[in-house]
Amino acid sequence: MASAVLVLNCGSSSVKFALYDAESKDRLLNGLAERVGTPAVSITIKFPDAPVTITDLDQYDHHGVLARILQELEGWRAERGLEITSVGHRIVHGGEEFSASVLLDDEAMAAVERCSPLAPLHNPANIAGVEAARASLPGIPQVGVFDTAFHQTMPPVAYHYAVPSEWYADLGVRRYGFHGTSHLYVSSAAAELLGRPLTELKMVTAHLGNGSSLTAVRNGESVDTSMGLTPLEGLVMGTRSGDLDPGILAYIADRTGADVAEITNDLNKRSGLLGLSELSNDMRELIAAAESGHEKAQLALDVFAYRLAKHIAGLAVPLGGIDVLVFTGGIGENSNPIRAKVLEELSFLGFELDAAANDRTVRGASGQITSAQSSAIALVVPTDEELVIARDAHRIAQTTTSLLEA
Ligand code: AMP
């Protein structure tokens, strides 16, 4: 029997999953369950030869959905002699409890629960996913991979907010950062691409997708990042505002009568590119609209790129300069006009664009987009968070199994 790793990313109403060959780390298939928790739930499994969509589910919570996914995979796995030997779970918030991926035993699950108040929409769904996987695959090691873990190396000067001390001591109010799995993956892939050790590089990684964040990476460790207690801080995003004056909350509440929950919802869902453009949160649509003269789409692009450049330059402080800037995520990997604009704004840091390389490095391509004379290097590196989860799950499951056997 060959070993396979099941990777799970459970949201409150969705389950994303993928199956990896444990040795080669090739992705064998993936899929998605949507509207989990409602009678309209559906599961799509992208078998390489013939994708299937299943809608006849009578148990539509995380448990029911996962049990059905595993049942559907059974025949396909058996034909190929594949056995699931570990499960890797994406977990959003690890607070100060987790600085690396871990085996999710009872003690670790209690710690994940303790982090739930920090991510009340995400951690409970992640926990439901772990419980469902434990029930459907009893005895198989479950491994947690945390969005926040990579940033636990940030020094106090980077993670403290200047707020009353007891907010931190009693309530855990500090900067945690997110997208850690992506920043970790692309920083080491970038060093590999350059053929230089991470210890030599002052690097900024820019994960630009619907959610966006930056990380300053020194000696392969996160020393600062743009997201904070929640993923709302930092860059302008698809529908999130990023940084703003906290005084705006009281002002809007006063003027409109909206409460904190409503305003927070607006800052998360009705702001960012969507709020500025009044058109879309989708970068492709905004670039096309701006080209045909849509002024608010142009404004949204300009604010996005300006803030991005300003934040990147700010990370020169913890790094003492920037040698390498890495673009990743849907926008970072595909949106050559945004990359060009940002590098132009950052020319004072020594970035000189290679326009032809920038234009051809899209749709999954990786490589350098600055010229040979450029003193600072910009790269595009497609991210692969699922692969990191699969790797960690297999590695940790193997250690656990060998400990049990010893
Ligand atoms: P992600 O959250 O990483 O999937 O990224 C989503 C964002 O990437 C959206 O704003 C998309 O418009 C953007 N994106 C994806 N493909 C392209 C493309 N070919 N050109 C520009 N933006 C793109």
Image: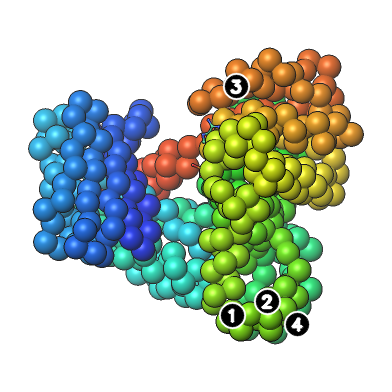
Q: Earlier in the sequence, mark 1 or mark 2?
A: 2
Q: Which class describes the residues within 10 Å of circle 2: few (<14), some (14-19), or many (20+)?
A: some
Amino acid at pointer 2: Ile
Q: Which class describes the residues within 10 Å of circle 3: few (<14), some (14-19), or many (20+)?
A: many
Q: Quadrant of residue 106?
A: bottom left
Q: Is residue 323 above or below residue 56?
A: above
Amino acid at pointer 1: Ala
Q: Is mark 2 within 8 Å of ligand 1?
A: no
For the point 22% across and 56% down, the residue is: 41
Q: Are marks 2 and 4 in contact (CB under 8 Å)?
A: no
- Of badges 1 and 4, the one in the foreground is 1
Marks 1 and 2, Cα distance to the nearest angstrom?
A: 7 Å
Q: Secondary structure at mark 1?
A: loop
Give residue 252's mark. 2
Q: Which residue is mark 3?
A: 361
Q: Is residue 298 left or right of residue 87?
A: right
Say if residue 90 shows up in the picture: yes
Give residue 164's mark. 4
Q: Are marks 1 and 3 in contact (CB under 8 Å)?
A: no
Say which of 127 and 154 sits in front. 127
Q: Earlier in the sequence, mark 3 or mark 2?
A: 2
Q: Are marks 3 and 4 in contact (CB under 8 Å)?
A: no
Amino acid at pointer 3: Thr
- Of badges 2 and 4, the one in the foreground is 2
Q: Earlier in the sequence, mark 3 or mark 4?
A: 4
Q: Is residue 39 left or right of residue 340?
A: left
Q: Is residue 273 above or below residue 383?
A: below
Q: Earlier in the sequence, mark 2 or mark 4?
A: 4
- Of badges 3 and 2, the one in the foreground is 2
Q: Position of residue 327 (x, y in %)?
A: 64, 35
Q: Are marks 3 and 2 in contact (CB under 8 Å)?
A: no
